[in-house]
């Protein structure tokens, strides 16, 4: 079946209270989506197209995107993200229960999703929060799914929907008799048959209880075990959960935002924390008395001191910029660290420090340091300008992960950046590219449209379009977009990315001469840190030219070696660069030089099987140039054994390992081992 001329239904993957779920394929974009046929009884609750479109506007990292509502004479279908992972009900069956450190993280993520829904105008309730509707993704985060039975609440803050036994709140049951059947409680007052935001709070509380205990809280309010009795749960977290699953809605948290604020500060509900804060207050009031005694004497000088400190801070920031402008990023970083120690909560120096790491090409260091700054809460945000700077910190973290090709982490960091600043078109441009790298074309195109609406420049538009064309496998169009970017941009980072991506597209399509010409031109024109990366790409291209022109192998190898040596002299040393040098030395029969490079790699990367793979091939190659009586393959076997030991610890597939296995078998069958 092809739905709406666009979505090819691949097969049923489940069904529930909201409808039947299918996996489908977007025919043009060739991406997977989820299509759900809404059940007739739920379909009747969608009163208008306008109400349905409310859900299409939702954008949140812990919610699936709803892309389309398709109405046919027979049914209504929704189209949304296909979320990889395992549902929490299956995870509970598999693992039984989870430690608080994991559940607390998911509690915060679900709280962010719930607060986002409840803060919409009009507010939106999910109304069916249960383990089956929560996906645990491969990267350990969650996604709250199944919006087909979600509903925008009207001005009376009431709505009417069905129930999921064990997770639905008491007020969702249709009448007192049904309620008593599930809750075993006599003498209740009449219960309304409508729900509000607090019903979501109750359902989420039941889910968190289940994740921690390994079983749901139970439907008997008189006998259920309090959360504080669950092993390994802190006092504060237990208090929050017990409050969430109170029978009376007035006794619960009233909105998702109120719950989120509580769970973000749950440690403050622990007795040890409360006792500690009491002691702090005593010391504070004592100090306050002493402070007021001296304040009259110092008040006149404080204002002038504040002005001087601000002037000094700005001057030191400018000094760091001057140092970095000369390419001395290490010294600029040290200057920012000193500034952070003196002005601990000011955000600007932290952002500059990360920027210098990024400019120096130290992407892992940039990401790690940025995460530490955020995790340790080293900065304060007291105004919009500082919030935007925090957004820039997340933006730098995201771009560092992009350079490291860890696109999942890059996406998470970019989404955090967008929470702090929704007006920066470069955020949306790079968010588009990160999404495209992961094949999420729907969201990527929307992010690019958002960037264009915010005034994205032509060079960035061409660059992003090039990335999208690569994912769509429209290679000629991608190359043209990248070349246009290179021609018109003044942004060194953008130019570097466009050059490398264009070179990669040419390489993958066996257009080696064009690739070399592009890289040679860029290397001669670019005078930044990017020149080193482009030089490494060019050296690799020279190596491949040697492979395709055997009669000129030595000449091309020497050109590549010269570039690699130039890079090392300039302090640009990577694993791949050194491995390539070893291969080139081996091809030129300079076995000692090759072994010297590989032994250094073995010292620097003792757990990398690839080093010992190369050493095994090198030693076997060297033996081929000796007389039969002089050959000794025992060292080859030692390197092979070490390689296999390390390789089997990795979850990778390397076709060269099969070649190595065959070589060892040949040596054994030939009597050499």
Image (tube, grey):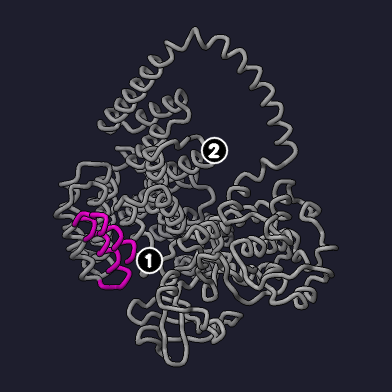
- For disc 2, the marked residue is 376
How many labels sit on residues? 2
Which residue is at a point 50% across and 69% down the rendered structure image? Answer: 152
Q: Is residue 205 left or right of residue 593?
A: right
Between the residue at mark 1 and the residue at mark 2, the CA separation in whole angstroms equals 32 Å
Residue 464 located within the stretch drawn in magenta: yes
Residue 554 visible here? no
- Pinpoint residue 549: horizontal percent, then vertical percent: 22, 65
Residue at the image point whose x is 27% and y is 55% from the top = 454
Q: Quadrant of the N terminus?
A: bottom left
Disc marking residue 42: none
Q: Nearer the viewer, residue 273 or 314?
A: 273
> In front: 447, or 493?
447
Q: Secondary structure at mark 1?
A: helix
Bounds of the magenta span? 445-474
Residue 98 quadrant: bottom right
Is residue 105 in sight in this rendering?
yes
Location of residue 603 in the rendering, given as x and y in whole percent from the top left corner: 50, 43
**Front in this rendered view, residue 588 or 305:** 305
Q: Secondary structure at mark 2?
A: loop
Residue 502 falls left or right of residue 122: left
Question: Eyeballing the image, is 265 above or below 36?
Answer: above
Q: Which residue is mark 1?
A: 443
Q: Residue at x 47, y 66 (%)?
A: 654
Q: Using the image, determine if residue 474 lies above or below residue 464.
A: below
> Dot 2, how many residues are within 10 Å of its Cα: few (below 14), some (14-19), or many (20+)?
few
The quarter in which the C terminus is drawn is bottom right
Tell whether label 2 touches label 1 (CB within 8 Å): no
Main secondary structure of the magenta stretch: helix
Query: Mark 1 vs mark 2: which is more N-terminal?
Result: 2
Q: Nearer the viewer, residue 6 or 57?
A: 57
Determine the image quadrant of residue 347.
top left
């Amino acid at each position: 079946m092809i739905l709406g001329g666009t979505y090819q239904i691949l097969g049923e993957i489940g069904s529930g209270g909201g409808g039947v779920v299918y996996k489908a394929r977007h025919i043009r974009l060739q991406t997977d989506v989820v299509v759900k046929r809404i059940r007739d009884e739920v379909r009747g609750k969608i009163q208008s197209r306008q109400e349905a479109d409310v859900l299409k506007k939702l954008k949140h990292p812990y919610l699936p995107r709803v892309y389309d509502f398709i109405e046919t004479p027979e049914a209504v279908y929704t189209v949304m993200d296909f979320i990889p992972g395992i549902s929490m009900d299956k995870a509970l069956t598999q693992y039984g229960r989870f430690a608080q450190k994991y559940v607390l993280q998911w509690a915060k993520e679900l709280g962010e999703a719930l607060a986002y829904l409840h803060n919409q105008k009009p507010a939106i309730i999910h109304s069916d929060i249960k383990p089956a509707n929560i996906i645990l993704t491969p990267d350990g985060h969650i996604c709250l799914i199944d919006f087909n039975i979600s509903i925008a609440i009207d001005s009376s803050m009431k709505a009417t929907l069905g129930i999921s036994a064990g997770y639905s709140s008491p007020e969702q049951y249709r009448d007192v008799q049904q309620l008593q059947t599930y809750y075993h409680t006599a003498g209740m007052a009449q219960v309304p048959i409508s729900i509000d935001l607090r019903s979501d709070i109750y359902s989420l509380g039941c889910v968190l209880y289940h994740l921690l205990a390994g079983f749901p809280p139970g439907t008997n309010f008189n006998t259920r075990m309090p959360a504080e009795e669950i092993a390994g749960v802190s006092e504060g977290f237990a208090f929050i959960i017990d409050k969430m699953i109170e029978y009376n809605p007035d006794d619960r948290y009233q909105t998702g935002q109120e719950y989120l604020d509580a769970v973000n500060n749950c440690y403050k509900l622990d007795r040890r924390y409360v006792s500690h804060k009491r002691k702090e207050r005593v010391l504070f009031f004592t100090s306050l008395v002493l402070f007021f005694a001296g304040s009259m004497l110092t008040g006149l000088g404080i204002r002038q001191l504040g002005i001087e400190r601000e002037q000094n801070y700005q001057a030191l920031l400018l000094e760091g910029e001057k140092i970095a402008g000369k390419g001395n990023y290490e010294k600029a970083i040290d200057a920012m660290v000193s500034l952070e120690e003196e002005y601990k909560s000011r955000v600007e120096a932290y952002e500059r420090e990360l920027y210098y790491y990024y400019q120096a090409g130290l992407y892992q260091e940039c990401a790690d340091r940025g995460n530490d700054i955020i995790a340790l809460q080293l900065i304060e945000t007291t105004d919009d300008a500082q919030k935007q700077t925090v957004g820039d910190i997340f933006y730098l973290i995201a771009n560092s992960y992009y350079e490291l090709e860890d696109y999942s982490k890059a996406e998470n960091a970019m989404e955090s950046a967008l929470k702090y600043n929704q007006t920066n078109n470069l955020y949306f441009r790079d968010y588009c590219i990160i999404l495209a790298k992961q094949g999420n074309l729907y969201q990527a195109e929307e992010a690019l449209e958002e960037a264009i609406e915010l005034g994205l420049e032509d060079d960035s538009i061409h660059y992003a379009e090039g990335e999208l064309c690569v994912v769509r496998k429209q290679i000629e169009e991608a190359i043209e977009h990248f070349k246009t970017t290179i021609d018109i941009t003044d942004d060194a980072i953008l130019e570097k990315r466009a050059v490398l991506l264009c070179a990669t597209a040419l390489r993958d399509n066996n257009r080696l001469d064009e690739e070399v010409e592009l890289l040679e031109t860029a290397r001669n024109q670019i005078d930044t840190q990017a020149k080193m990366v482009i030089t490494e790409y060019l050296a690799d291209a020279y190596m491949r030219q040697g492979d395709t022109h055997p009669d000129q192998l030595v000449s091309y190898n020497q050109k590549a070696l010269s570039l690699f040596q130039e890079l090392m002299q300039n302090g640009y040393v990577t694993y791949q660069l050194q491995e390539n040098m070893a291969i080139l030395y081996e091809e030129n029969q300079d076995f000692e030089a090759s072994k010297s490079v590989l032994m250094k790699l073995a010292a620097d990367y003792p757990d990398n099987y690839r080093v010992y793979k190369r050493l095994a091939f090198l030693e076997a190659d060297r033996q081929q140039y000796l007389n039969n009586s002089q050959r000794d393959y025992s060292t080859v076997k030692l390197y092979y054994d070490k390689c296999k030991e390390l390789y089997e610890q990795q979850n990778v597939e390397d076709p060269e390992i099969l070649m190595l296995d065959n070589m060892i078998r040949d040596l054994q069958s030939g009597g050499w081992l």
